[in-house]
């Protein structure tokens, strides 16, 4: 006689399933937390690297300058912000940042007019270098035209008593009738020229390279 087989009983534990689901959720949450932590750490590291690069570049190669005063109008206005390179060979017409010879701790912004060996003369608002007339298109502005309408010179007449010495420079501001420059404080040593202006980034609508 064959007795009928009773099917095996299958135990189903709802608590076990809940525990497994809970553990899976915890693992997923932990992984998500670790991903967020890695992302934040990566951002911090990237920011630190960028700040290091910025500090390095602006410590040894570039400088960030703000114009103060009217001596370079209208080329630059008060409050203009500029980038200057630290390593350069000065040439005529370069716009440079220099240590003020007559004011300790101050910086001036001027234009290089005379280089070593030059004889500089200004007569009737015309510039002569070593006897040759040199055009100054940057002076064709409202300030010069105003002085001419009043019958006045924009640049006072002068002739240097000597040629520009070795390793020194003769500089002037573009706003000639208000600028305090080499006409008053004399030649500027090369070591005092600390930057050449290459870019204006503020105001934003007046970006320009030089």
Image (tube, helix red, strand yellow):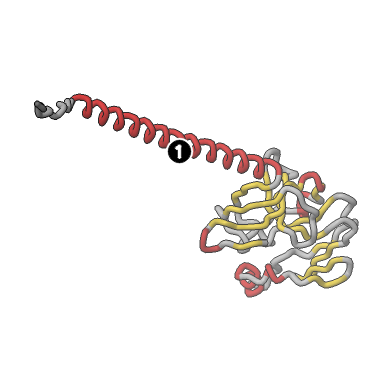
Q: Position of residue 164 (x, y in %)?
A: 87, 55
Q: Is residue 20 above or below residue 206?
A: above
Q: Is residue 39 above or below residue 196?
A: above
**Image quadrant containing the N terminus:** top left
Which of these two is toward me, 31 or 44?
A: 31
Residue at the (72%, 48%) spot, across then down: 86
Which of these two is toward me, 166 or 177?
A: 166
**Which quarter of the figure has residue 93?**
bottom right
Which of these two is toward me, 194 or 199?
A: 199
- From the viewer's perspective, is 135 left or right of 179? right
**Which quarter of the figure has residue 54?**
top right
**Image quadrant containing the C terminus:** bottom right
- Dot 1 crowding, Cα within 10 Å, few <14, some 14–19, many 20+: few
Which of these two is toward me, 146 or 172?
A: 172
Q: Dot 1 lies on which element?
A: helix
Whether residue 83 is visible: yes
Whether residue 124 is visible: no
Residue at the (31%, 29%) spot, across then down: 26
Q: Which residue is mark 1?
A: 39
Q: Position of residue 10 (x, y in %)?
A: 17, 28
Q: Position of residue 178 (x, y in %)?
A: 66, 58
């Amino acid at each position: 006689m064959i007795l009928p087989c009773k099917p095996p009983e299958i135990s189903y534990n709802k608590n076990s399933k809940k525990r497994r689901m809970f553990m899976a959720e915890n693992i997923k949450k932990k992984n998500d937390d670790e991903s967020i932590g890695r992302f934040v750490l990566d951002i911090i590291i990237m920011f630190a690297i960028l700040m290091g690069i910025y500090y390095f570049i602006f410590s040894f190669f570039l400088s960030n300058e703000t114009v103060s005063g009217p001596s370079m109008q209208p080329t630059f206005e008060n409050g203009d912000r500029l980038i200057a390179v630290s390593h350069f060979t000065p040439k005529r017409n370069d716009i440079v940042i220099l240590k003020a010879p007559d004011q300790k701790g101050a910086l001036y912004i001027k234009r290089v007019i005379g280089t070593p060996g030059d004889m500089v003369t200004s007569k009737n608002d015309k510039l002569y270098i070593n006897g040759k007339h040199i055009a100054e298109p940057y002076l064709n502005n409202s300030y010069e035209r105003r002085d001419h309408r009043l019958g006045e010179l924009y640049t006072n007449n002068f002739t240097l008593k000597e040629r520009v010495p070795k390793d020194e420079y003769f500089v002037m501001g573009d706003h000639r009738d208000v600028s305090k420059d080499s006409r008053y404080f004399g030649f500027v040593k090369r070591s005092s020229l600390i930057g050449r202006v290459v870019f204006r980034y503020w105001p934003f609508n007046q970006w320009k390279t030089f």
